[in-house]
Amino acid sequence: MSTQLLVPFTEGDRSMSALLGGKGANLAEMTRLGLPVPPGFTITTEACREFMAHGSPPPELTAMVTDALRDLEWRSGQMFGSASDPLLVSVRSGARFSMPGMMETVLNVGLTDVTLPGLVARGGARFAWDCYRRLVQMFGHTVLGIDASRFEDLLSKARAATGASDDAGLDAATLADLVGEFRSVLVSHTGQDLPQDPREQLDRAVTAVFASWDSPRARVYRAHERIPDDLGTAVNVVAMVYGNTGPRSGSGVCFTRNPATGKAEAYGDYLANAQGEDVVNGSRTTLPLSALAGLEPAAHAELLDHLRTLERHYRDLCDVEFTIEDSRLWVLQTRVGKRSPAAAFRIAADLSEEGLISLDEALGRVDGHQLESLLHPRFDAAAGHEPLASGLPASPGASVGEAVFDPATAVVRAAEGRPCVLVRTETSPDDVDGIIAAVAVVTARGGLTSHAAVVARGLGRTCVTSVSGLDVDESQRLAVLADGHRIEEGDLLSVDGTSGHVYAGRLRVTPSPVYAAMAGREPTSPAADDESTARAVRLLLAHADRVRHLRVRANAETPAEAREARALGAEGIGLCRTEHMLLGARRELVERVVVDDRRTEALAEIERLAMEDFTELLTAMDGLPVVVRLLDPPLHEFLPDLVELSVRVAAEGARGLVEPALAARLAAVRRWHEQNPMLGLRGVRLLTVIPELVDAHVRALVSAAAVLRQQGLDPRPEIMVPLVADVAELALARRRVEVTLEQVATTRHTVDCPVGVMIELPRAALTAGALAGEAEFFSFGTNDLTQTTWGISRDDAEAGFLTSYREAGLLADDPFTRLDETGVGELILIAVDRGRVARPDLGLGACGEHAGDPESIAFLAGAGLDYVSCSPPRVPVARLEAGRAAVRPSEAGDTR
Ligand code: PEP
Ligand code: MG
């Protein structure tokens, strides 16, 4: 049992990530693979959980660490605390799920006034003092909680005083002075100097890493990424290797493939004469990995070899941290790397074509959210705007927002619904809540593997790093560019994370090239990377289409929408909202039907127009089902506003003449006015008030289909009745439809037109067995079903209390966006069961917003539905998710 508290690298493997954390498990795995990993051991997440429970590490850990250190000494040939050849260690956090930069690391632990001369002997005075100042700095910040800027300020003063352009330019004497100054900071802030007992340094560093699991920024990140709070982090204690001994040494971060585009070539950043943190914190400008080939050809070749080994072994994109000490390569970390949505598709498709993974697996490696972001529009490149500034394209996307210069303001702006762009010199883990809140991040420093780049990519935020000439003054809420242009808080910026350009103002956007490729249109800018992404998307969508059981239809009313949906792969229309065909000038016709005596004329005109519309719609979807829903919205939406009309009548009354027609209108509006229209006269209930209008639509639809059939086409109309609560309502609607069908059939061709019902009230779900007797199909209207199950108005939800509910932790997700599986989902499952028992061949679909939401689709597929129907742009997303659901059945399907 107690062995679970500490595991040497030689005894673990990658399957143990729950216990060893991702970093520890992978270090052990690389050790097993024979990669050059420095010796080390992992203090487990179990020890961290004990720390969280009791406020101190488990007592047995002390002796275990002593033994493990002895083993490390034996393997490295160095002694912890030795004055002549000291073993130093790094203390690195590593949770089960990657939390980039969220928690702490302390390097060079074991360095004291006594052991310093041994380090001087190893790599010279400059190197030794550089290690010492890093230790004091990290210990001061991480263990003693001193603000990092205290040390940064002293460092930049030292750079200014010596004319050094970066920290690597500081000489031994300056670094020795800095160590003295840093130690004074420790004493003045905490009353304590750096402990001179190496073991005390180590124990306190381990405890600090445990404690960092609970830091506010780690909590924010976990909440966003849905990582449970009780997992705890592991701590890796690793023999130090040094990238800062001189020009033949250095540190780097690299990926087995390009994490932004997915291109199959090793990719990364390298810094000579540096320790690892320098690469990621963006404090110095890095070299591309390819430059290492010239500097250290043997180490470079060896590294590429290891990258190939790792990618074949993990069968995925890996990222790697490495150090070169006096030309000798060490691998310090690997994990399956984060990637942009475009890279996710390309890598999954390429790996399957390379035979490393199956197509089913490839499908599991991408998701609908990623596809959705690829389908988003881009800035209009053809518009010829001059960028304000340019940097590295760190995370793709096209986002517009107000400039803000600190994370707190980003959070406030986002809460106000104002998109913002976080502009920073560089980001640190303290900025994470700001990055989550912002639509884009722009930094002056940092490469493609910098903190900002990694976090933004993981979160799907647009990001441009290393913007040359950008000088950010956070305290003044201002950034100045090389040409003197000032960016002030609130200025609009358009950030293009695909090209790396930042523009002033709001740029026009054009459809994404991937979207254009999906829809069969010519892309506006067929760049090679875009073509590769589109190809990968097509490959994986084709596989999704092969394996999925769930059909995908679109919600569409206009022929243009229908054609677009079909081009994007829709297999019919699952919801045509007839009321959307009565907007604009046509609204007045409905008003005349409700209010006027001359309703016959208005009805005839509505029928004529509807027949035109349906003809086009059925033609666009020839051979595929088109589900037309009978009129649904509250009647008042077609009538003038009660207050406005009352004011007009009162004004005319004051002048002594109220036109009788106006008075009649007011009377009608008053009559139909409701306090709660969403729970009032709408849906099937309208049949009792304006049945002729419903008849007109049915006649128009069936007539249009009959004409098209005569012309040799294959129209497939279906009719759907909304907001039914009771089977009697459905039976009434059905009879009415059948009478009209018979009338049309006597005058034209017979048209088969199945009648279905929307399940969008809890009562409908519960009485599904009875409803199935009167309906050939069900379509779940999950928007209204959510509204009526929760008793929350769908129109006010976001602006109202749902946001505060989420903030208070009462609700993880907006139930109008992500299907509430527990409540609404249960009603769906009940209705499916009862409906299918009553009518085994019952058709089943869903057409609320959830039908296009990636997570909800998985549930709906598992519930046994035949199709989902979503807005046309989301059709590819739904196809992909339906495919994913088929290769990884959802829980709803599994548990039933
Ligand atoms: C629904 O309620 O889910 C639905 C599709 O209908 P509407 O959004 O038009 O009310
Ligand atoms: Mg509805």
Image: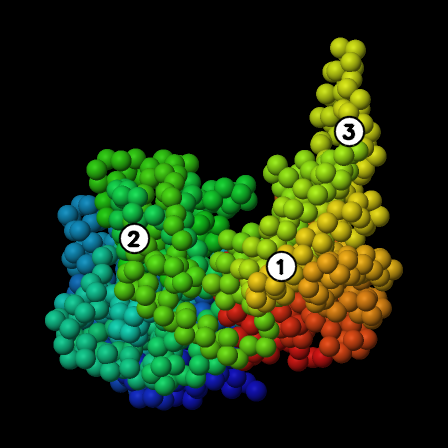
Residue situated in front as seen by the camera: 332 or 466 = 466
Residue ID for mark 3: 665
Is ligand 1 closer than 8 angstroms to the Cβ of mark 3?
Answer: no
Q: Is 237 drawn above or below residue 447 in the view shown?
A: below
Labelled pair 2, 3 in contact (Cβ < 8 Å): no
Q: Earlier in the sequence, mark 1 or mark 3?
A: 3
- Label 3 crowd (10 A; few <14 / some 14-19 / many >=20): many
Q: Position of residue 456 (x, y in %)?
A: 40, 58
Q: Position of residue 514 (x, y in %)?
A: 39, 62
Q: Earlier in the sequence, mark 2 or mark 1?
A: 2
Q: Earlier in the sequence, mark 2 or mark 3?
A: 2
Residue ID for mark 2: 500
Residue lying farthest to the top in this orientation: 655
Q: Is 747 drawn above or below residue 634 in the view shown?
A: below
Direction from residue 726 to residue 208 in the image, left or right = left
Q: Amino acid at mark 3?
A: Arg
Residue situated in front as seen by the camera: 302 or 274 = 302
User: In 3D space, how far apart are the residues under numbered discs 1 and 3 (Cα atoms)?
Assistant: 38 Å
Residue drawn at x 17%, y 63% is 126
Q: Position of residue 531 (x, y in %)?
A: 32, 65
- Label 1 crowd (10 A; few <14 / some 14-19 / many >=20): some
Residue ID for mark 1: 707
Q: Position of residue 628 (x, y in %)?
A: 67, 57
Residue drawn at x 75%, y 69% is 776
Labelled pair 1, 3 in contact (Cβ < 8 Å): no
Q: In this rendering, which labeled residue sits more in front, label 2 or label 3?
A: 3
User: In 3D space, how far apart are the residues under numbered discs 2 and 3 (Cα atoms)?
Assistant: 58 Å
